[in-house]
Image (cartoon, rainbow, N blue to C red):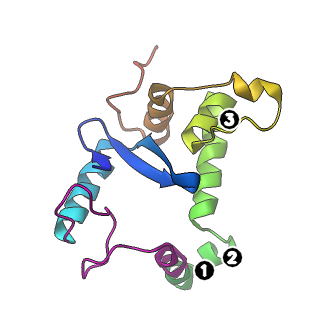
Amino acid sequence: MDLDITYGLVRLREKGETLRWQPITLDLASRLKDHASARGALLPAEQLLRYRDGRALTPRRYDHLWKRIGDRLPWVAAQSVSTHWLRHTTLTWVERNFGYGIARAYAGHTDNTGPATTTYIKADIQAVATALAALTGHPHPLAAESKG
């Protein structure tokens, strides 16, 4: 129930029990579905990402993965690449290419702290999908048609 392979969406469970749909490539959606099936997630309500033995992944898994990647690729360790680093880099690219409002939506930022204008700067899921399509070079079913 957290994966929509038709529209390329994954439901994220974030801080404060916030739920939101995030556009992903159709290829990633398909591979996540295959992963879940192969690892024993048989019911729609079961967690998507799992270990080989079928247990649901924990946040500590990501720390361990980045340690292992850094052991194999010294530049990853030297640059302190992590999931947060990837998020920051992606959001910087989205902001520079699509603007602040779309970067906020891409990140799932819905708070109204900061300048008063943040209350009015909004972007919809189609704008996020359009940014994703540009970033990845893969079309997305929710993306706005390219003008040009």
- Using the image as rendered, state which of residue 46 and residue 148 is in the foreground: 46
Quarter of the figure with residue 120:
top right
Q: Are marks 2 and 1 in contact (CB under 8 Å)?
A: yes
**Residue most toward the right?**
115
Quarter of the figure with residue 139:
top left
Is 42 magenta? The answer is yes
What residue appears at the point 46 percent right and 54 percent down from the top-left corner? 13
Instruction: Tell me where residue 7 appears, x and y as whole percent.
Output: 29, 35
Side of 76 relative to 112 (left or right): left
Residue type, numbered disc 3: Arg
Mark pair 2, 1: CA separation: 6 Å
Residue 100, numbered label = none
- Using the image as rendered, state which of residue 127 and residue 21 is in the foreground: 21
- Using the image as rendered, state which of residue 76 and residue 90 is in the foreground: 90
What residue appears at the point 39 percent right and 44 percent down from the top-left corner? 24
Q: Taking the image as drawn, is residue 34 in sight?
A: yes
Q: Mark 2 sits on what residue?
A: 78
Q: Mark 3 sits on what residue?
A: 96
Mark pair 2, 3: CA separation: 26 Å
Label 2: few (<14), some or many (≥20) within 10 Å? few
Q: Which residues are magenta?
A: 40-66
Q: Mark 1 sits on what residue?
A: 74
